Image (cartoon, rainbow, N blue to C red):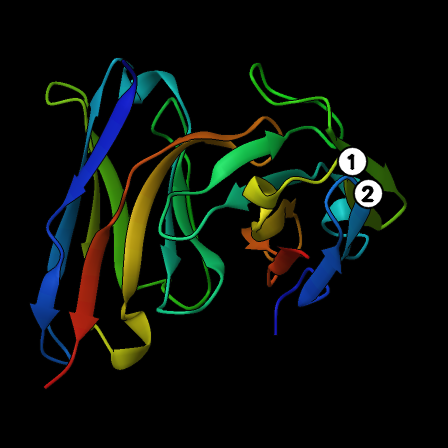
């Protein structure tokens, strides 16, 4: 069964950092483009970042550029999102998803919740 | 304000047809592809349409997608109460070099 499971979310103070993980089973993370998408409570989907299947290309939403870093560990079959300088506007459910905007994101995790508050 | 514009809500009766529009620009829909997602309450998004009009395996043919210029449309026929959900369009924006989602459309099946 193909599955993505996120972890690493939690409550963090403004200005703090968190590293989110997305462990894949049934697929090999390094074979696909992978994305992070977030959804603030009661709000819509917002794309955050992506990494190419080769690992050589990474892209970020303007709102997180310079603060977030996407990466992966092929040996652990895990996708990561390092989040620094967090602000209240980063409070959301963060989900990882496999795919591209052309072929669609066809596998999604259930997400991990990040709350930025003092 | 989302880069892709969707109506906040649509509604129709069971068995009827509904369309959801997604308006973009030449740097996203106009030069690329659109995908559509269904998000049932409390669940992860589900891919309904890829490459403007392709249905992944397992998606009912009641769901269809089309694109014209800088706009796209999701159509749902034979509406069922189980179709009540939020629907999102998405595309890659070559100018922003970023993915963009529409603001989402809440479908109510009356």
Q: Chain of mark 2?
A: B
Q: Position of residue B93 (x, y in %)?
A: 64, 50
Side of B4 where B84 appears, left or right: left
Q: Which of A117/A1 is in front?
A: A1
Q: Residue furthest right?
A: B68
For marks 2 and 1, the one nearer the N-term is 2
Q: Position of residue A86 (x, y in %)?
A: 21, 72
Q: Position of residue A42 (x, y in %)?
A: 41, 69
**Mark 2 Cα within 10 Å, few/some/many (few <14, many 20+)?**
some
Measuring 27% from the left and 13% from the top, which residue is drawn there? A1
Residues beneath discs 2 and 1 located on the same chain: yes
Residue where numbered disc 2 is placed? B17
Residue where numbered disc 1 is placed? B77
The image quadrant that residue A72 belongs to is top left
The image quadrant that residue A34 belongs to is top left
Q: Chain of mark 1?
A: B
Could you tell me if residue B97 is visible in this image?
no
Measuring 65% from the left and 29% from the top, which residue is drawn there? B50
Measuring 49% from the left and 62% from the top, which residue is drawn there? A44
The image quadrant that residue A35 belongs to is top left
Q: Are marks 2 and 1 in contact (CB under 8 Å)?
A: yes
Measure the alpha-carbon separation of dots 2 and 1: 4 Å
Measuring 71% from the left and 23% from the top, which residue is drawn there? B54
Quadrant of the image containing the N terminus of chain B: bottom right
């Amino acid at each position: 069964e193909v599955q993505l499971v996120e972890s690493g979310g939690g409550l963090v103070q403004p200005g703090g950092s968190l590293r989110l993980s997305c462990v894949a089973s049934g697929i090999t993370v390094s074979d696909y483009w992978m994305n992070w998408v977030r959804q603030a409570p009661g709000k819509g989907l917002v794309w955050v970042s992506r990494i190419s299947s080769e690992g050589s290309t990474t892209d970020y939403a303007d709102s997180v550029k310079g603060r977030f870093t996407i990466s992966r560990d092929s040996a652990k079959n895990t996708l990561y999102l390092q989040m620094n300088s967090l602000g209240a506007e980063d409070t959301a459910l963060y989900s990882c998803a496999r795919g591209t905007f052309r072929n669609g994101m066809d596998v999604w995790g259930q997400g991990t919740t990040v709350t930025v508050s003092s | 304000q989302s880069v892709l514009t969707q109506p906040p809500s649509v509604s129709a009766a069971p068995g009827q047809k509904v369309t959801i529009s997604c308006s973009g620009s030449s740097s996203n829909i106009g030069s690329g592809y659109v995908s559509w997602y269904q998000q049932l309450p409390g669940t992860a998004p589900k891919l309904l349409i890829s490459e403007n009009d392709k249905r992944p395996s397992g998606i009912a043919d009641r769901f269809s997608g089309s694109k014209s210029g800088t706009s796209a449309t999701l159509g749902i026929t034979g509406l069922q109460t189980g179709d009540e959900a939020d629907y999102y369009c998405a595309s890659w924006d070559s100018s922003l070099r970023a993915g963009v989602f529409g603001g989402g459309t809440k479908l109510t099946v009356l």
